[in-house]
Image (cartoon, grey):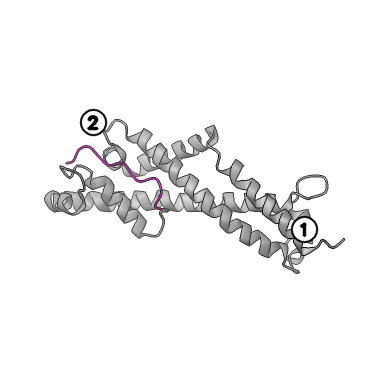
Amino acid sequence: MRISNTIALAAATLAVAAVPATALASSASDHSDAQKQCAAELKAMGKATFDKTFGTNRNEKNAFGKCVSHRQKQDSSDMSTATKNAAQTCKTQENDPNFAAHHSGKTFAQFYGKNKNDKNAFGKCVSMTAQADAAATETAQVKAEEKAAKSCRAAQEKDPKAFKAKWGQNHNDANAFGKCVETTAKSSGSSSGSGGIGTGAGGY
């Protein structure tokens, strides 16, 4: 049975509106994901570089907690952006007359629908697509920060004074390393710009 464009658009709008409320909710799972990402960064950077990147107190012992907070904020921003983009992607798929031909003969509703009459297909499509896209973005961001940290460490070791002068932005330039990593990671195009990296409390 054909549904009018007005009803279809209204249903799509309601489906999209329902996704962010659940997808962006702060949960134990979100915290766990951020912890895993930070554990990966700690392993890749090494403790000294990791602490300089994220630590904000005098002995930088809060580095891991600050990293987790940073990643949670950035992951939330990534999910928000991915959800908006996914809505358009799913609308295009829903209107694609050749969808079934590329999805094992299943219609859009059959492929994504998870309830009795597949009426939740659009919402499920948005959720699945957004989660996959956000995960890919988060992975790229973690890798960008790891690469940036190594680059900043090399520059700092080459000329510590010049490094502080270039990157320091507080009263004693002690936040230079974190700012270098944050800015360098952003310049790679892999950072959302949300959830800034630690301000730093000490320097080499």
Residue furthest right in the image: 1
Q: CA distance from mark 1 to mark 2?
A: 59 Å
> Secondary structure beneath disc 1?
helix
Q: Verify whether residue 198 appears in magenta.
A: yes
Magenta segment main secondary structure: loop
Kindly tell me whether residue 146 is visible in this rendering: yes
- Is 19 displayed left or right of 32 in the figure? right
Local crowd size for mark 2, using a 10 Å CA cut-off: few (<14), some (14–19), many (≥20):
few
* Image x and y of residue 19, in percent: 63, 47
Closer to us: 104 or 14: 14
> Secondary structure beneath disc 2?
loop
- Is 14 displayed left or right of 23 in the figure? right
The residue tagged 2 is: 59
The residue tagged 1 is: 7
| Quarter of the image where one finds residue 108 | bottom right
| Quarter of the image where one finds residue 103 | bottom right
Q: Identity of the amino acid at label 1?
A: Ile
Earlier along the polypeptide chain: callout 1 or callout 2? 1
Residue 176 marker: none
Q: Identity of the amino acid at label 2?
A: Asn
Q: Which residues are magenta?
A: 193-204
Task: Classify 53 as above or below 58.
Answer: below
Q: Verify whether residue 115 appears in magenta.
A: no
Local crowd size for mark 1, using a 10 Å CA cut-off: few (<14), some (14–19), many (≥20):
few
* Image x and y of residue 58, in percent: 22, 32
Q: Which residue is painted at 75% across and 59% down in the image?
A: 8
Kindly tell me whether residue 133 is visible in this rendering: no
